[in-house]
Structures are given as structure tokens and as C-alpha cells.
Image: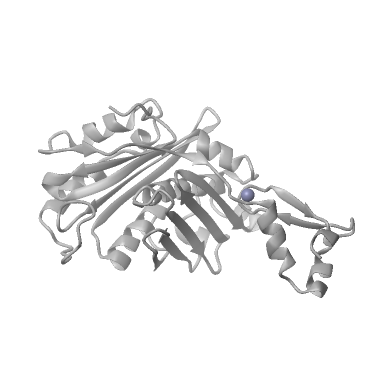
Amino acid sequence: MPSVQLNTDVALGVAIPSSNARGRIARLGPVVDSILASHAYPAAIERLLAEALTLTALLGSLLKEPQGQLTLQAQTEGGIVDLMVCDYLGGELRGYVRHDGERLAEASAEPTLEELFGDGYLAITFDQPVAKERYQGIVPLEGKNLGEAAQSYFAQSEQIPSLVRLAAEKHGGQWQAGGLLLQHLPEGEEGRERLHTRLDHPDWPHVAILGGSVKAEELTDPKLALDDLIWRLFHDEDELRTLPAIRLSRGCRCDPDYVRSVIARFPVDEREAMVGDDGVIRVDCAFCSSSFTIEPNELS
Ligand SMILES: [Zn+2]
């Protein structure tokens, strides 16, 4: 057994070799609260970001390289949300949502995916610097929820039969979010070259039914360890393996020196236009809400 506690702020890899399936299961608790603490979002946006961070953790933990980065970005037109960005690097997560608070206040208490995103697109970027692999897939934000939109990402963009379930609930004032991702691997083992793809493989519906039976309250229950939940779902399979757990934490990579170097590249007249009434340039990090102050004379 891994020494990491498998209850919260953790992602766990799952393999069901006898059914040619693999997956990830994740639960996020304090990490979500600490990311949300940098923002002051209404409950519906908090729930959306909690689910999006869970999806980001599921996808990010698929990366083979420890320094691989996964970015999930929703770009929308005509919805309550006009931009949502989350990313993952080495178990560190961050994210933010730009939205129209007035329109949200007029919407239903639990806005649909369409109300939130309008004509939106979900872009998912896998970036593995050592192998110099960068891959981006884009799909329309369609379906009942973010999980369904992610499922169509795999079907359309990667042609892999997949199941994605996401849930987020507040327990005693604290968020608990959980997610399950299962994929059919046409040629068996993880990491092997994919030779052909069949969306109708006989093993898959069986795995999808078992995985699909997971309940939102199981995904979000911090007392239920993830390996116990996986066992509950798949104990009848001939072979069931878990991979080493990945601990999830909040992490922002904003860096005052980097911000300064970006600002320094602007032409002098544009830099002068950025200076506020107090004589300094202020730059806010959208992810963690940190505010940087730059003296204009530092730049020349
Ligand atoms: Zn930051």
C-alpha cells in the first residue's frame, strides 16, 4: 500500500488489464478551498471551478513526465462565463473563472452548461517538454455538465471510448470534489502504441457500466478512501491494479521577476500608459490574485 492517504487531495491511477481499461480517480478537498480563497466567487461558479479542477487533476495525472503541464481552457461566447482556465504541473493546480455576476444572479440556482458557457469550446493542451510533445484538442462545450463535455473531448479528439464523472459538494462549509476517468485502451497496456481504434470494443460497455454506477456522494465522501471506492466498483474484474498516488496541492507559478521582464518588453509609451495615479504599475495574477507593484524606473 502506498503511504499517501487516499482520501483527499490525491489522484490515483487505476488499471483493469483484463478489460483493456485504465483510468484515474481523484478527490480534492482543502486544495479546492485554498484555490477558491483567492477569489470571491458565487456558489455556482465555485462548484464549476471545483469540478474543472478535478477534471484538470484527472487529465494532468495522465501525463508521463513529472514536468508535463496540462491546461484546460474554456472559451465562450454569449454565456455567463467568458473564460475559465485551469492548469496542472507536477500535482500543483490552479484556476480561475471570468464571469458576469449580474447575469449569473438572473440565472437559475444551478445553471446548465449552456447557460454558463453559451457557444463555448473546451481546449485541452497536453505539454510534455522532455519529449517535446505538445498536443491540443478542442471540442464544443456540449452536454449536461463538464464531465459530459470532457467525454466528448475523448470521443471526438482522441477517438478513445471514455467515461468521465465529476461531482462537487459542500460539506460543513468546505468543498469536496471528486472525479473518475476511465478509458478503453484498444491495445491493452498503458503506453503502448495505439495501432487501431475501435469505438465498439466488447470489453468497454461492461467497464463503462461499472464505472458509470459511481454515485456523486461516493466521489465526494472524504471518509471513503479512493482505493476502497475502486475496489467497490471493480472487485469482480479478473485483475485490478492501482498506480502510485499523486498528491495534489495548490500552486501558482506567477513570479515578480517574470512579470517585470514581460512589462519591460513593451514600448516606453505603452509602459507609461500602464502607470497608475500612485506612480507605479500594478499587475494582478488572475490565478492567485497576487498583486505585483513595479516601479517604472526599475524597467529602464
Ligand atoms: Zn499567481
Of residues 142 and 22, the one nearer the viewer is 22
Q: Does residue 253 appear to the left or right of 153 in the view shown?
A: right
Q: Residue at x 29, y 42 (%)?
A: 13
Q: Does residue 222 appear to the left or right of 161 in the view shown?
A: right
x, y percent for residue 248: 45, 39
Instruction: State whether residue 10 is above or below residue 200.
Output: above
Instruction: State whether residue 168 is above or below residue 21.
Output: above
Residue 51 visible in the shown view: yes
Q: Residue at x 52, y 39 (%)?
A: 32
x, y percent for residue 216: 36, 39
Residue 109 visible in the shown view: no
x, y percent for residue 288: 63, 47
x, y percent for residue 254: 62, 51
Give the total of numbered labels. 0
Q: Quadrant of residue 102?
A: bottom right
> In the rendered view of the protein, which quadrant contains the C terminus?
bottom right
Of residues 105 and 22, the one nearer the viewer is 22
Q: Residue at x 65, y 51 (%)?
A: 255
Of residues 190 and 237, the one nearer the viewer is 190
Q: Residue at x 16, y 66 (%)?
A: 195
Q: Does residue 11 appear to the left or right of 297 in the view shown?
A: left
> In the rendered view of the protein, which quadrant contains the N terminus?
top left
Q: Does residue 129 appear to the left or right of 250 in the view shown?
A: left
Of residues 117 and 257, the one nearer the viewer is 257
